[in-house]
Image: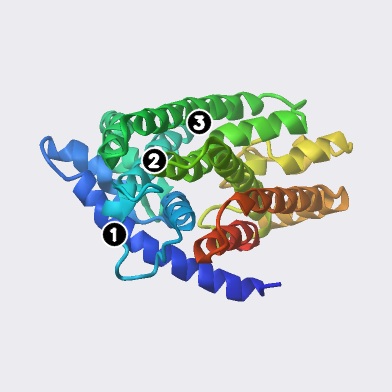
C-alpha cells in the first residue's frame, strides 16, 4: 500500500504538470477583449489559481485510454491522437470543464454572499454584482464554444456537448436542493447523496467521461468513466464536510464548523439526526463570526460519539474503492494509476 504522504507528493506533482498546460491554454481560449471589464471579471478566478483537478482527470483519462505519458515533453494535448489515430484537441475539452467550474464558483459566491475566494475578493466584491452575474453567464456560454473546438467527429462532439449541458442542469438542481435542505431537519442519507451527486460529483463525472467520448471510447468504457467521476466526486464532497469540522480555521481559510453554524446539511449531520443528536443545539449561534472554537470542539466531540464523522469517512472510503474498481476497463499504465491515486488523495488530503 502506498504511503499517503508519498502518494500526495506524487499526485500533486502530476497535477502540477498538467495544470501548467491548462493554465497556458486558458488565456488562449478566453482572451481579454472588448468589453475588457467583462472579460477581466470572467478570467479573474481562473487567473487567481486553483488545482485544476477536473481538467487533470480529463487529461489523465485521455492518457490512460491511449497509453500516452502525460509527463513526456512530446505530449501535445492540442493534437492528441484519438483511438483511431486522428488528432483531437483534448485541451479544449479540459479547459471547458474548468470554465464551467469557475462559472459555478462565481454564482455560488453571489448566492452565499461570500467575500473571498482563492484568497482574493470574490468576483462580485471586486467587480460588482451586475458584472459578476454577466461574467458567470459569459463563462457558461464560452464553455460550450470552447468544447466545439476539439475537432472530434460530429457525433462525438454532439455527445460531449449534450453531456456538458446536462451536467450544468444537474449542478443547478443540486444547488437548489442544497438551499432547500437548509430549511429541513428530516433529510435522509439518500437525499443528501443525490444532492452532492448533482452539485459536486457530476462535473468530475463529465470530466472523465468526456475524454472517453471525444477520443472514441466505447459506450461501456464511457459509462465506467462517468461512474468513476460520480464516486470520486461524492467522496470529495463528503471529505470536505469532514474537513470543515476537523481542520483548524487558519488552515481552512474560513471559520471551522461554518457548515454547522449555517445549518448546511452534510452526511455527518444527517447521520447524527438519525441517531438522536439534537444537531440544531450543537452550537448556539447562527453567526459564523460569533461562534467560538470551544463550541466547535464540543460539537465535534458529540458527533464523534455518535459515530457520525466516522460514518462519513467510511462512506467516502467505500466510494473511492468503488470508483477505482470502475477503472478496470482502462489499460494498465501510469495514467490509470494516477487516476487511482488521485481518488485516494481526495479523501486523504488535509485541505
Residue 270 or residue 255, whichever sits in front: 270
Q: CA distance from mark 1 to mark 2?
A: 15 Å
Is residue 197 in sight in this rendering? yes
Where residue 307 appears, as percent x and y from the top left, is 85, 50
Location of residue 325 with respect to 107 vertically, above or below = below
How many numbered discs sit on the rendered protein?
Answer: 3
Which of the 4 quarters of the picture holds residue 124?
top left
* Disc 3: which residue: 171
- The residue located at (64%, 44%) in the rendering is 231
* Disc 2: which residue: 214
Mark with earlier residue (2, 3) = 3
Residue farthest along the left direction in this orientation? 34
- 193 horizontally vs 276: left or right: left
Circle 1 or circle 3, nearest the eye: 1
Where residue 332 appears, as percent x and y from the top left, is 57, 62
Q: Mark 1, residues whose alpha carbon is within 10 Å: few (<14), some, or many (≥20)? A: some
- The residue located at (21%, 50%) in the rendering is 27
Amino acid at each position: 500500500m502506498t504511503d499517503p504522504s508519498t502518494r500526495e507528493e506524487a499526485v500533486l506533482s502530476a497535477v502540477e504538470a498538467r495544470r501548467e498546460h491548462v493554465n497556458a491554454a486558458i488565456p488562449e481560449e478566453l482572451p481579454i477583449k472588448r468589453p475588457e471589464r467583462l472579460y477581466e471579471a470572467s478570467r479573474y478566478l481562473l487567473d487567481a489559481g486553483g488545482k485544476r483537478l477536473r481538467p487533470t482527470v480529463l487529461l489523465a483519462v485521455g492518457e490512460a485510454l491511449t497509453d500516452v505519458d502525460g509527463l513526456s515533453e512530446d505530449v501535445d494535448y492540442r493534437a492528441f491522437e484519438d483511438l483511431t489515430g486522428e488528432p483531437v484537441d483534448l485541451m479544449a475539452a479540459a479547459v471547458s470543464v474548468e470554465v464551467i467550474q469557475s462559472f459555478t464558483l462565481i454564482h455560488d459566491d453571489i448566492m452565499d454572499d461570500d467575500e473571498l475566494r482563492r484568497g482574493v475578493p470574490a468576483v462580485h466584491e471586486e467587480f460588482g454584482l451586475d458584472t459578476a452575474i454577466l461574467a458567470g453567464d459569459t463563462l457558461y456560454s464560452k464553455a460550450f464554444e470552447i468544447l466545439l473546438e476539439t475537432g472530434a467527429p460530429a457525433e462525438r462532439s454532439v455527445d460531449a456537448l449534450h453531456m456538458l449541458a446536462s451536467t450544468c442542469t444537474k449542478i443547478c438542481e443540486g444547488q437548489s436542493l442544497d438551499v432547500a435542505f437548509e430549511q429541513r431537519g428530516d433529510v435522509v442519507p439518500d437525499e443528501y447523496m443525490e444532492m452532492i451527486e448533482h452539485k459536486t460529483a457530476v462535473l468530475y463525472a463529465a470530466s472523465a467521461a468526456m475524454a472517453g467520448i471525444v477520443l472514441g471510447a466505447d459506450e461501456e468504457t464511457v459509462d465506467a468513466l462517468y461512474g468513476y467521476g460520480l464516486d470520486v466526486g461524492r467522496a470529495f464532497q463528503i471529505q470536505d464536510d469532514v474537513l470543515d469540522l476537523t481542520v483548524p480555521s487558519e488552515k481552512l481559510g474560513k471559520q471551522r464548523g461554518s457548515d454547522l453554524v449555517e445549518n448546511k446539511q452534510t452526511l455527518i449531520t444527517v447521520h447524527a439526526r438519525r441517531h438522536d443528536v439534537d444537531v440544531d443545539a450543537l452550537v448556539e449561534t447562527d453567526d459564523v463570526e460569533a461562534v467560538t472554537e470551544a463550541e466547535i470542539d464540543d460539537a465535534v466531540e458529540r458527533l464523534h460519539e455518535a459515530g457520525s464523522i466516522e460514518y462519513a469517512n467510511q462512506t467516502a472510503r467505500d466510494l473511492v474503492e468503488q470508483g477505482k474498481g470502475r477503472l478496470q476497463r482502462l489499460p494498465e499504465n501510469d495514467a490509470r494509476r494516477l487516476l487511482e491515486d488521485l481518488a485516494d488523495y481526495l479523501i486523504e488530503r488535509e485541505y
